[in-house]
Image (cartoon, rainbow, N blue to C red):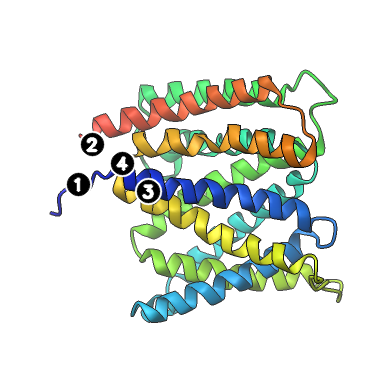
Amino acid sequence: MAPNIHRPVAAALWMVGSIVGFSAIAVSGREIGAELDTFEMMLFRSIIGLVVVAALAIATGQGSAMAPRHLGRHLFRNLLHFAGQNLWLYALALIPLAQLFALEFSAPVMVALAAPLFLKERLTPARALSALIGFLGVLVVARPGSLAAFSPGLVAALLSAVAFAATALVTKTLTRITPVMAILFWLTAMQTGLGLLTAGWDGDITLPGARTLPWVLVLGLAGLLAHLGLTKALSLAPAVVVTPLDFLRLPLIAVVGMALYGEQLDPVVLVGGAVIFAANWINIRAETQFRGVT
């Protein structure tokens, strides 16, 4: 077996790219939203991703990843992911960026709670505690007692987190039977098809204009950068090192929202996000100690 790789500085640099990528997705989505609907955004984002992933697969000698294997499971995963992404983009236009990102961080907590049911993993006390703390964090961010705060955008953000959690569970089953490149290729290929169907159901697909086209390119490339950076970081350092760095997305996007869109810096959202982060930390720390990872 190959020795564990532990390069925290390199992991931190990759996480900088990931954080920039996720933030760029949010900003580009906001800029595009006035001209394109969420289905059109997903269509063009997926086309860009498909071209890049296919070229990368061929250039690295992984063309076999494009072979049609396990298509039923790929389709199920991508239906979940497509729904989650559209809900996320819909919420992006309706609620503050920091609130959206904080709720997105609840997805790993949902995975920890659902894994024993769908992946036959044991429900440990740490997982149960992290799920409880994560739920409390979601309540802090969502503030369901305030009807004004409990808006359609907030509901969409919560549903997107559920969809992302379900996607993660299906992805975990796929990684046991197929390479990552195949998952990426069929992600972009199938979501291009889904985007074409949903964006074109009325026979009218709006093409990005001169002002919007650069933001569409940013949206497509930033998504690849964000996930590549996160994946590479996790390959270079343990999750207990990477996760706190990923959480820096929340205060950063709060500042971006304040600077670019005049959003108020809501300390309650930051506190709720910190509680959700603590839930993720408890679960990841317990898992790494259980598996003997340092």
Q: Would you say the residues marked 2 and 3 are in contact, meaning their CB atoms lie under 8 Å apart?
A: no
As helix, strand or loop, the secondary structure at mark 3 comes to: helix
Going by the numbered disc 4, the residue's amino acid type is Pro
Going by the numbered disc 2, the residue's amino acid type is Val
As helix, strand or loop, the secondary structure at mark 2 comes to: loop
Q: CA distance from mark 2 to mark 3?
A: 16 Å
Q: Which residue is mark 3?
A: 233
How busy is the neighbourhood of tag 3: few (under 14 within 10 Å), some, or many (20 plus)?
A: many
Q: Which residue is mark 2?
A: 293
Going by the numbered disc 1, the residue's amino acid type is Asn
How busy is the neighbourhood of tag 1: few (under 14 within 10 Å), some, or many (20 plus)?
A: few
Question: Where's residue 106, x and y in %?
Answer: 56, 34
Of labels 1 and 2, earlier in sequence is 1
The mark lying in front, picked from 1 and 2, is 1
Q: Quadrant of residue 180?
A: bottom left
Q: CA distance from mark 4 to mark 3?
A: 8 Å
Q: CA distance from mark 4 to mark 1?
A: 12 Å
As helix, strand or loop, the secondary structure at mark 4 comes to: helix
* Residue 4 in sight: yes
The answer to whether residue 229 is left or right of residue 267 is: left
* Residue 84 in sight: no
Q: In this picture, is 77 found above or below 157?
A: below
Q: Residue at x 84, y 61 (%)?
A: 35
